[in-house]
Amino acid sequence: MSQVLRMLIAVSICANALTIAIAQENKTGRYFCVTGYSGGLKYDPRTRTWDSMGFSVEEKDKFILGLSLEKERTEKINGMDVLMHDYKIQITRTDKDRPDRCLPIGSGFGFGENQLVTTYAVDGKLRCNTIFLEYVFSLKTNRFLAAYFQGFIDGDKTGNTPNIKAGTCTKIN
């Protein structure tokens, strides 16, 4: 490989890393998130079957997402240095006064006060869970998914319905 080609590749990699770092550095802050779509499963006791259906979006489906970039680090993955960002995340529903910590998926509850949620700089996605919901946030598109995975697996009952919500977040400060 020629010296010029090597230099162009190196410059390209550096420029890409700088672009990703700049895109990530402004993500600390608060975002107002609004659910636009909601759907899931509902049990019909009359027919004793589960059916898919759309759900109405309610005021409680709006929330404030608080992101605090706590640490930036490089980790070796498959022999490559990958830029990682560790965030502290809080979610405050508009119908609540107190925020919920959003912890790493599978971390359990009540033991994660200092746990951070990690995102790879290249994909910019955060995955975390509160006590009832699992969230995926894209820091590149400012979109989110929130899923409630209870109900169906607990047996055939009304009122406890698995669902997924999708929406967008706008930075407010």
Image: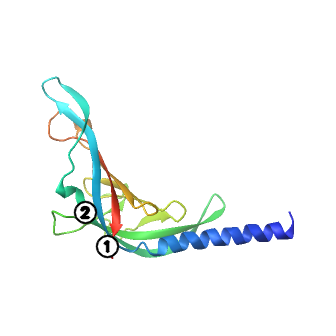
Tell me if residue 136 can be seen: no
Instruction: Give x and y (percent) for residue 36.
Output: 29, 52
Q: Is residue 45 above or below residue 85?
A: above
Residue denoted by label 2? 63
Indicate the amino acid at tag 1. Answer: Ile
Instruction: Give x and y (percent) for residue 62.
Output: 23, 60
Q: Residues within 10 Å of mark 2 (few under 14, many from 20)?
A: many
Tell me if residue 6 can be seen: yes
Give the image's coloring scheme: rainbow
Whether the residues at callouts 1 and 2 have beta carbons within 8 Å, the answer is: no
User: Closer to the observer: label 1 or label 2?
Assistant: 1
Q: How far separated are the C-alphas under marks 1 and 2? A: 12 Å
Instruction: Give x and y (percent) for residue 26.
Output: 44, 75
- Front residue (pair 126, 110): 126
Indicate the amino acid at tag 2. Answer: Phe
Residue denoted by label 1? 172
| Quadrant in the rendering for residue 105 | bottom left
Q: Earlier in the sequence, mark 1 or mark 2?
A: 2
Q: Please report the residue visible at 19 percent of the width from the left and 64 percent of the height from the top.
A: 94
Mark 2 element type:
strand
- Indicate left or right for 134 with 93 as reference: right
- Indicate left or right for 127 with 84 as reference: left
Q: Is residue 164 above or below residue 34?
A: above
- Front residue (pair 76, 96): 96
Where is the N terminus found, in terms of image quarters? bottom right
Q: Please report the residue visible at 21 percent of the width from the left and 50 percent of the height from the top.
A: 57
| Quadrant in the rendering for residue 33 | bottom left
Mark 1 element type:
loop
- Front residue (pair 169, 117): 169
